[in-house]
Image: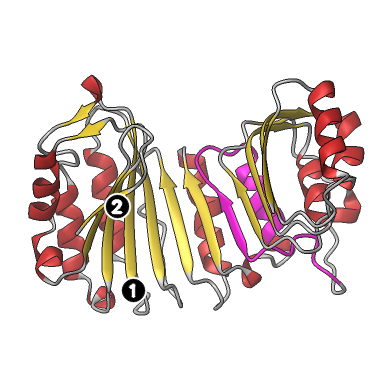
Amino acid sequence: MSIDYYCHGIQHGMTVLCGILSSLPKLSALSLCFMTVGAAQAHDFFSMLPKSLERLTMVQIILSTLGDLIFLWSQLPRLRTFVAVPMMGCGGTEIPEEYTRIRNDKQLLRATDFRMSWWIPCFDAIVDWLCAQNVPAQLRACSACVAKSQDIAPVVRLLRVFGTALECFELCMTTPGMEAIRASGGLKELHFAILLNGTSNADMFLCMSRFLSQVRAPGIRAVVFSFYGDIPGGRLGDKPVPQLDSLAIALSQNGALEGLDRVVVRLSEGVGRVKESAYASIRGALQWIEDRGLLVIEVHENGDEKKWVY
C-alpha cells in the first residue's frame, strides 16, 4: 500500500498525517509533498513513520539541517528507494557526531536506489556523508544533478566510489560544464535528464556529447534522454531537439556502446504539445539508431498518459 500526502500547513497537516500513518503499520510507500519540518518537529515526526516503508519520496520538503535528513534515514530499516525531487530547503549542514562515525554493525541508510534529482541544497555535504559511510558501494541505481558548477566535483566523486552493484545512473543537468565526469564500470543503463529553457542549449549538448564519447562501460544496454522544460508558444516545432544529431554521432563513435539494445528519447510534461512532424525529425537525427530498430520515443502531452512511438 502507498500514500501520496500533500501538506500545505505545518502543525495541522502533520497532526492529520500522524493520525493516518498510525493506522497503517504495514505501509510500504509514502510520498511527502510541500512540507516544512522544523527542528522541534523532526525527531518526533520521523520517529513515528512506519518502519515498514520501503520507498520514500520527498517533493519540496524544507528541513532545518542535514542531520534531520540522516535521522530520517536511520528510522527506516527497510528503506530501499529514496527519492528527492527536489528538496527545496535545508537550513544547514550540521550533522550530529553520532551520525558521522563509521558503523560496522548497520548502515544508517540502507537504500539501494538513491535519487536526488534537480537542485538539491547541501548536495556536496550529502555526497561527503554518503561516501564516508560507504553508501555508494551498496547502490544499484542513483541519480545526481549538475545544477551549478560546484556540483561537478561531488558527482565526479560519486562515480569514482560506486561499487560493482550500480546498474543505472541518471545525470540531471541544468547547466553545461561536465567534461570532468566519467561513467565506467558495470552500468547497464545511462539516463540523462535535460532541462530545456527555450534558448540555445548548444553548450549543454556539446558537454553531453563529450560525456558520451568518454563512457567506458561496455555493459550498457540502454541510454535514455529525458527532456523537460518550457517551450515558447507551448508547442514543439519540427525540430524539438535541434542538437540531437550530435548525441547520435557521439553514440556511434564510442565502441564501448556497441552493445546497446535501445535508445530512448523522452519528451516529458512541460514541453508543450508535440507536432507529428517532430517524431520524424527525431528519427532523422538518430537515423542509424532507427535503422537498427533501437529507437523508442516516449511523449507526455499535457498530462495525458504516455504515448509510445516506435
Q: Label 1, secondary structure: give it.
A: loop
Q: Is residue 150 above or below residue 41?
A: below
Residue 271: quarter of image: top left
Q: Position of residue 195 (x, y in %)?
A: 36, 37
Mark 1–mark 2 distance (CA, rounded to whole Å): 18 Å
Residue at the (27%, 79%) spot, across then down: 259
Residue at the spot of label 2: 208
Give the residues in magenta: 106-130
Is 199 rendered above or below residue 52? above
- For numbered disc 2, what is the local secondary structure? helix
Say which quarter of the image contains residue 58.
top right
Chain-order first, disc 1 or disc 2: 2
Report the amino acid beneath label 1.
Arg
Residue 31: x and y in percent read 66, 43
- Image coordinates of residue 64 in percent, x first then y, are 78, 31
The residue positioned 81% from the left and 62% from the top of the image is: 77
